[in-house]
Image (cartoon, helix red, strand yellow):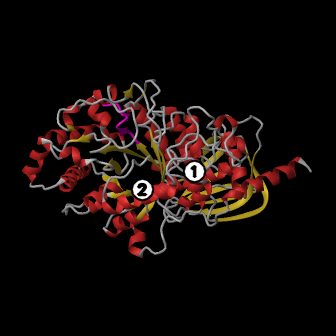
Amino acid sequence: MTVVSISHADARARAANLVPKPRSMQLGAGVFQFPAHLPVRLEVPEEQREVVRRAIALLPMTCTVVDEPAALRVLLRPDATPPEGYLLDVTEAGATITAADRAGVVHAAQTLRQLLPDAAHRQTAPADTPWIVPVIRVEDSPRFGWRGMLLDVARHFLPKREVLRHIDLMSAHKLNTLHLHLSDDQGWRVESPRFPRLHEVGGWRPTSQVSHYSDEVVQDGTPHGGFYTRDDLAEIVAHAADRAITVIPEIGVPGHTGALLAAYPEFGSPSGQDRAVCTTWGVQDALLAPSERSLEFLRLLFDELLPLFPSPYVHVGGDESVLRAWEDDPVVRAFAEERGLSGSAEIFAALMSEVRHMLAQHGKTPVTWDDSFAAQASAADDDGSSGTLVMAWRGAEVARRAAAAGHDVVLSPVMPTYFDYYQQAHPDEPLSIGGPVTLEDVLAWEPVPQDWSEAERARVRGIQCQMWTELVADPRLVDYLLYPRTCAFAEIAWGSPTRDLRQRLPRHLDRLAAAGVEFRPLTGPAPWQRGGTGGRAHRAGVPMAERLAGYADAAASGTVADAPGA
């Protein structure tokens, strides 16, 4: 077999193993070899040229924009495709990308990158790499507009370099929403010049729980912390935007505020209680107090932080608020009496209403976990709370109730989108908070149940996978837990026409290996990824069926369940 015929066969094999799989793909005869110094002709409005040029820079070749006919032609046509869709035509004479928007160009560039040799996924490819792609026509567009991933950087901090790397991997799989969980009981991760104790005090803890929830609490005795400066966040947001990814911050209230209240206890309930940044996991009783003083604090904090994030959405938590702390608090009672509120549900609803109004001043739509929707369902609230987007983690039924009540929803159920859960019921799996959530579980998932009405289905904005980090202190373990399950999630989110990913994954994992991703092999964990017999030893925990039943019961009653990451 000649070198040329091997190149042809390799190119066709790469086309047969794209992830996520395009909606329509026609493979022709022949190949095209891109030059290492690639001339690109941009037929786009002048004001879009720079952002489109940066999208094309995702390709491994050195790209130069020219005005004459070129090996790669990029057309931006508003009516050419659905939003985020693209047409990719490769002939033996060159390639053309046509898209309605910049996001479509990004997705086309990522498909073209997968069609190239795996070296395209390295930071620096060998100088003699032949950039050969098959003759092909791809017509593609996504099913869901929200294709998200949550990174919990509050429980265990991820350095900026890791966040940027995960943004690159999200883009490679055509995910478009990064949900950064920036605050919790165990850490505050945003620099605040106005309230510096937030990052100076709330940004670190002296030790962390390393034991499983089913065992006696064991601490590691090692300080942990970190925060992102304002310049870091500007870089993260810009890096994501160049890859058609929106960064949505989460600053949760009134629960999950232990780190905030360790820095500023005067805003907490019970009033005046000193706190430290929490060193254990699970639901805590730290609550922001509904009072005029704490509301003014939130206004000033949002005024400072929200301009850092161009996203139209801001996640404000609303989950797992153990409201009994308010029952005997004189500050809370005064707030309730002044506003004519009766009971914790009405007080909670009033506080979240204030938060919505604060976000509206910045043109932002609030996002909350489904706990907030369930807790407020019985409280009188006619001020536009249906404008809140509900992120449903406790199952399809609470998501359906939120949709029926007029909320847009993002489906993020524990099964099968919690990727901090172990991947197989086997002692080789490293310590995780629960499980299993298998690759097959993800592949089998149909996000929107068939028995939903058309009106309810229309409320589904998209889906999201979650990387909680209570027991995930090592960035290498983040890779292990995310991939290849994220590949399967991306297939579902994009809406690939078949479920044959198992056949395509081995070839796709070669791309991830070239990118340096420490994924879980399909045959099971590598020797250094196993739990062993030490601190990472596998724990079975509560059976998944029992855990899911508990979540469903709590969602139905509007009561607190385990933590989202638990």
Question: What residue is shown with label 1?
Answer: 486
Amino acid marked by disc 1:
Thr
Q: Element at badge 2?
A: loop
Which of the two residues, 468 or 353, is positioned nearer the viewer here? 468
Residue 445 on image: x %, y % = 55, 63
387 relative to 165, above or below: below
Question: What residue is shown with label 2?
Answer: 393
**Front disc: 1 or 2:** 2
502 relative to 215, above or below: below
220 relative to 82, above or below: above
443 relative to 149, above or below: below
Task: Give the residues drawn in magenta, as a range.
Answer: 181-192
Which of the two residues, 70 or 149, is positioned nearer the viewer here? 149
Furthest-right residue in view?
Answer: 1
Residue 391 on image: x %, y % = 39, 56
Residue 248 on image: x %, y % = 40, 47
Residue 194 seen in this snapshot: no
Q: Which mark is residue 43?
A: none
Amino acid marked by disc 2:
Trp
Which of the two residues, 258 or 310, is positioned nearer the viewer here? 258
Q: Element at badge 1?
A: helix
Residue 221 on image: x %, y % = 45, 24
Among the 4 quarters of the image, the one containing residue 272: top left
Residue 110 seen in this snapshot: yes
Position of 15 compared to 65: left or right?
right
